Image (cartoon, grey):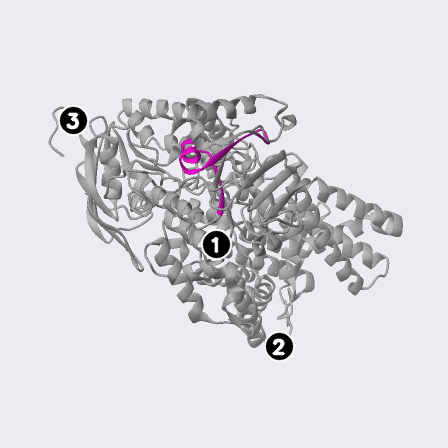
Amino acid sequence: MAGPLGRNLGLVVALVLLCIAGLVTAGDRFADVDNVLTILRLAAVIGVVSVGMTFVIIGGGIDLSVGAIVALSSIWATTLATQAMAADFHWIVMVGTAILVGAACGLVNGVVIAYGKLVAFIATLAMLAAARGLAEIIANRRTQIVQDQSFIRFFSGDVLGIPTLVIIFALVAVLGWVLLNRTRFGRHTFAVGGNAEAARLAGIRVQRHTVYLYVLSGVACGIAAVMLMARTTTGSSTHGTLYELDAIAAVVIGGTLLIGGRGTIVGTVLGVLIFTTLSNVFTLNNLSSSAQAVAKGVIIVLAVLLQQRVANRNPRRRGLRGGTPEAAGTSIPGSPSGTPTPGAAAGPTT
Amino acid sequence: MSAQSAASPTLLEMHGIVKQFPGVRALDGVDLEVRAGEVHCLLGQNGAGKSTLIKVLAGAHQPDDGHITWDGAPVTLGDPQAAMTLGIATIYQELDLVSGLTVADNVFLGRERSRLGLTRPAQANKAAGELLTRLGHPEIRPTAEVGSLSAAQQQMVSMARALSQNARLIVMDEPSAVLDSEEVDHLFQVIRDLTDEGVAVVYISHRLEEIRQVGDRITVLKDGRTVATGLPVQDTPTREVITLMTGRTIEYVFPPRRALPEQEAAPLLEVAGLSLAGSFSGVEFDVRPGEVVGLAGLVGSGRSEILETIYGARKATTGTVKVGGRKLRSGDVAAAVSAGVGLAPEERKSQGLLLGDPVYQNISISSLSRFTRGGFLTGGPEKAAAREQVRALDVRPPDVDREVRTLSGGNQQKVVLARWLLRDCRVLLLDEPTRGVDVGARSEIYALIRALADRGVAVVVVSSEIPEVLGLADRVLVVADGAVVTSAPADELDEHKVLDLVMQGAVSTSGAAREGDVA
């Protein structure tokens, strides 16, 4: 993990530039503490989803179903039955339900992908359709109001002036960072995404690990659903619409490779902050959400182009038969120093 | 197999191992017996079943039949973890490392030590550094990303990984393939240290002379069967080993040259003043029909780049390439191909073949226009033409519908050649045509190349193996530091002379300024 700062320097610069743009165009309205907290509160929900997504993508997969899982979790956690139980016992029942539903959806994703050998794109696309559909059936297409005021009070409150939602995001991000960089689980995630065969030969149970990754993403969606329920005081089958795209975009501009094996939590967090700050700056300047969407698209392309430029400047030499995926499509890669040849030693000896 | 007195105890015994893949019986009753503290060499042609056998031994493949005994007790190697737990470590040929992780991460992958669930990078880095120092490579930083290392350094990481397992048996699949001779010497020293400690090593290599240096006993595989086991290295003549591997005695590895083509024949390929910035400069040579020209030189001398530039895969900085008197547009592969130039690239698997496609599609890919009618491909004639080439080149198995992936290295090379034969190409550029091809199949490839030349094709061969260039080519160009330093008939040169030239060039710093064609 050489030079985490260096790797994310571009993102930090982008964020700073955005903030300067905000300051120049909106002045005090942007620099206001409440506004900053608003940005962070907005970033929190999608941020939690993105942390889970980071794991899945580093592990060589993709999860298109995160938005739908958020919706289903929010609906299941706010049904009359769940809320009745919560009223009898404690609002923690709602939290538990949301997380369990998320985990279950992730489990289905993971099992279908790892053992059913479905491509992740297809499996989670199916879950995207099915989970939101199921949410609509359960809710009968109605928005469900959260009755438990102590639930709302707890999650919408703040600790020492910092919103609880933001603290949850920070906790998830820190735990995610530790899990990815300081545990066997994280190490294995890089290995499974970087070279699944090598991981298997190293004794890692690749299929089981893949299942864990999607369960992890599902749990993140469950947590995000709870946060969204608190922020909107509702459960709805329209919650989390297009979260999959926002999360993937944040992860990708954060420097995580879509082919797996490389990526950082810090980058993802910065990616989320960049998009949320961008939205905020646009909103403060009374620009439409359509203009935001265009800007978002441009940023994604620019960020990835920039990353490739940087990646090309330090060409990574791989194994003899590996060849970088970028080079595989071109006619004849291989520079004099780039591909060491085994025959080199054969001359004098044969 | 006779009982030797005072022999070390048997550590591993594999008996009657059978492994069936769809359509292929990769192992058909293999026996292997390895003693503690010995270097046991596993020999066999490509496709003989060596790789499958070591994957069975590593727990990566489950055998369909047979018994494995470890330390006197029967065992089942259900998964890689089981093999590692017993003390079997495997260094694979295909460098099975994760390029996005650090050196230390790779060394301990799957066996990370952690406390309270947290990994301990500092400790792992220290341990990895010690292992690499023991291997004579203290310069490889444990925190470096594996993707940024050279192939030889990656090989060392694989070695460190095997050492870190404190294994009792280490399987090395062609460990020397990416190492230079000094590194190979060091590797042998490490192997000797290991065997002194009682560790057994199963050593696979195509280089028989290495086996002479480091091996104790030999097991030979052929077509998925053990044809000889436990032969003592010192008392077995090379000829006998080759006979066992190929099933026949090789009298002439290189086909005889024809009388040199008439000097008057117009050259088919003319290269004049060809330069590629940063790679080579002022390269001049002609190849007449029926002539084989060899380019000898070290890796990085520019020899592969010369071929690729002639082929148009790289755009020449200056200079011209003419085929049959017509100038080729620089940097245009399609123009070169339509003028009748074919290239069999060095990286056969990544640059030469569509591995997942059947043999016939690989053969016909450059001649598709011949098999289309009204814009649609006609399957029948396409396959028939491929079948004809497969028969002519003796590709085994002779099945044009088989995926190329499943063929051995030598047969894959034949498929590449078949492609250009079908296209009736006039100029054939071969980059390391026998790399990864075993001894028996090599002579077939040599004979094939000579047969092509005899049909009037102009052939240019690049090889790192000087004897190969000398034995195969009519004329040899020695390339050093991006310039042709000598051009002479092959029978006027010998290995030492070429080696001297190659080395001088490599030492000289102003090689690029040297005159192009000395002869």
Dot 3: element: loop
Write down the residue under mark 3. Answer: B7
Residue B517 figure quarter: top right
**In the rendered structure, which segment of residues is drawn in magenta?**
B458-484
**What residue is pinned by disc 2?**
A141
Residue A6 bears which disc, if any?
A: none
Rendered-image quadrant of the C terminus of chain B: top right
Residue at 80% over, 52% down:
A35
Whether B197 is among the magenta residues is no
Work out how far the residue at label 2 is from the one at label 3, CA to CA, in angstroms.
Answer: 80 Å
With respect to residue A175, does B64 lie above or below?
A: below
Kindly state the secondary structure of the residue where label 1 is placed.
helix
Horizontal and vertical percent for residue B16? Answer: 18, 47
The image's mark for residue B420 is 1
Asked where in the image residue B194 lies, by quadrant, the reply is top left
Can residue B471 be found in the magenta stretch?
yes
Please tell me which residue lies in front, A207 or B511: B511
Amino acid type assigned to the residue bearing label 2 in the image: Arg
Q: Amino acid at mark 1?
A: Trp
Disc 2 and disc 3 on one polypeptide chain: no
Chain containing mark 3 = B
Q: Is residue B196 left or right of residue B446?
A: left
B188 or A286: nearer the eye? Answer: B188
Measured Cα–Cα span from mark 2 to mark 1? 64 Å
| Viewer-proximal residue among A146 and A39 | A39
Q: Which one is in front in this view, the residue at disc 3 or the one at disc 1? A: 1
Q: Relative to B476, does residue A253 appear above or below in the rendering?
A: below
